Amino acid sequence: MDRLNSLLAAETNRRRLLGRMAIGAGAIAAPALAQQMADLHLPGGNDERPLTTAFPGKGSMILQRNRPPLLETPMEVFDRSVFTPNDQFFVRWHWSDIPTSVDVETFRLRVGGMVERPLAISLAQLLRLPRIEYAAVNQCSGNSRGYFQPRVPGAQWGHGAMGNAKWTGVRLKDVLDLARVRAGAVQVRFDALDQPAVPDGPDFEKSLGLDHARDGEVMIAFAMNGEQLPLLNGFPLRLIVPGWYSTYWVKALNAIEVLGAPDENYWMAKAYKIPTAPGADVAPGSKDFPTTPISAMIPRSWMTSLPEGQVIAYEPEIEVGGIAMGGDHGVARVAVSSDGGRSWRQATLGPDEGRYSFRRWDARVPLVRGRNRIAVRCWNSAGVAQPFRPIWNPGGYMRGNVETTTIVAS
Ligand SMILES: Nc1nc2c(c(=O)[nH]1)N[C@H]1C(S)=C(S)[C@@H](COP(=O)(O)O)O[C@H]1N2
Ligand SMILES: [Mo]
C-alpha cells in the first residue's frame, strides 16, 4: 500500500507538537539597547560587542548584526553543558528577509526534480515517519574568523558561532525514497523560506551529493534538545548534515530538488569555497588559487572554565575544563598545556554523546605566578590532531589550530 497515503489517512495528534509560531518583524528590526558588552579579544581591536536579549526565543546573546540577525553564543554558555540551550544557540542568516511566522497547517515540504513522484509533505505527515535522534555540532564555516591575521572581511565572529544540540527528525533518505529518485540523479538541492532582500540577489540554496544525501544520517530535523526549533534556528524544519559545516544545514527547509547535474548556484559555485591546499591554508593575501567547496569539519577544542585575561589567586595547580569536538569523527584525546605548549597533560574526557557531539574535558595544570598560557589540543578518532599554526584564507573559513587562553595568577 502507498505509504504516504496511509500516513495521511491516519490522523495524528502529534501535530500539536508544533504550534503556530510567530515573531514580529518589529522585534527583529528593533536595535538592542547596548548595555552590557562582550569582549571577543579579537586581534587588532574593535572587539567589543553588545549583549542583547531583544530577539524572540533568545536569551543573552552577543550581537554581531541586527539585520539579518547574527547572534553569537557567549563562551561561558559552553562551560555549563556540552548541549547548547536553544535560547542561547547562535543565529546566522544571509538575507534579512527571513520567516517571521510559519503556519504549521498549510506548511508543505516539497520534493521534486528528478523523482518519480513529486511530493508536498505536511508537518503532520512528516511527524509520522520513523524518527532518528543524535547529537551534532552546528558550526559556521567562519566561526572564529575574527582571529584571522591578517584580518579578512565577513562577520568578525569569536568562537561562539557554533553550538551542539540533540536533533530529532526523519532521515532525508526516507523522504527521498518516498519520492523515488530517478536514475541519473547526482545531487540534491535544499531551498528554504528565506528570500533574497534585493531583486537580483541569489536565493540561499545548498546541495549535497546524492550518496551523501542518502547516507541515512543526514536528517530533516523538527526538534532540537527536545523542543521545536526556535524560529531563528529554522522552525519548523532544518537539514542536519552531521560532521559538515553549517552552511549545508539549511534552515526553514521547504523544498528539496533532486538534480541531474551539479548545482552551479552562487552558494555552491562561488560562496563557501576554500583553498584546495592542505588545511585550507594559503599565504596571506593570496587570491588566485584552486578552490573547492567547504565540507567536513576538523577537530577543535577550547578552554571554557576561565575567560581570556582572567586574574586568579595563585595556586600551584588548578582545575581547568572545556569542550572538544572531533569534526567528522569522535573525540579520541585531549591534552592541555599551561606553559604555552612546552609540556602537556592528558585531560579526562566526559561522557561520549556520539561522534558528532561536543565532549567535555577536564584537567589539572600547574601554574606559575604571573601570566600562564593555557593551550588545549584535540585528536579525533581518525588520528587527526589540531595543528599549532593558524591557517589563513580570504574567506576566514575552517580555523582549527590549537587555541590558547592567557590567565594571570597573582
Ligand atoms: N535558510 C537558510 N539556512 C541557513 C542559512 C541561511 O542563510 N538561510 N545560513 C547557513 C549558515 S552559513 C549557518 S552558519 C547556519 C546557522 O545556523 P543557526 O542560525 O541555526 O545557528 O545556518 C545555515 N542555514
Ligand atoms: Mo555560516
Image (cartoon, rainbow, N blue to C red):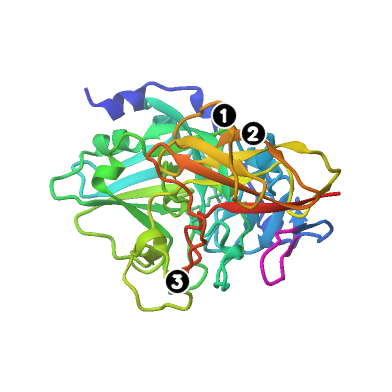
Q: CA distance from mark 3 to mark 2?
A: 46 Å
Residue assigned mark 1 = 226
Q: Is mark 3 in CB contact (under 8 Å) with mark 1?
A: no
Ligand 1 within 8 Å of the CB at mark 3 = no
Whole-percent x and y of residue 116? Answer: 18, 42
Q: Is residue 144 above or below residue 256?
A: below
Q: Is mark 3 in CB contact (under 8 Å) with mark 2?
A: no
Quadrant of the snapshot with the N terminus: top left
Residue depicted at x 67% and y 46%: 338
Q: Secondary structure at mark 2?
A: strand
Look at the image and tell me whether residue 73 can be seen.
yes
Circle nearer the N terminus (3, 2): 3
Using a 10 Å C-alpha cutoff, classify the residue at mark 2 as few (fewer than 14 neighbours), some (14 to 19) or many (20 or more): many
Circle nearer the N terminus (3, 1): 3
Residue assigned mark 2 = 362
Q: Quadrant of residue 320?
A: top right
- Mark 3 is on which residue type? Gly
Residue depicted at x 51% and y 28%: 353
With 78 as the anchor, is 152 left or right in this view? left
Front residue (pair 58, 152): 152
Front residue (pair 70, 346): 346
Whole-percent x and y of residue 84? Answer: 62, 39
Q: Main secondary structure of the magenta part?
A: loop
Residue depicted at x 37% and y 49%: 255
Whole-percent x and y of residue 100? Answer: 59, 52
Is 41 part of what is drawn in magenta?
yes
Look at the image and tell me whether residue 293 can be seen.
no
User: Magenta span covers which residues?
Assistant: 39-49
Residue assigned mark 3 = 201
For residue 124, the mark is none
- Mark 1 is on which residue type? Gly
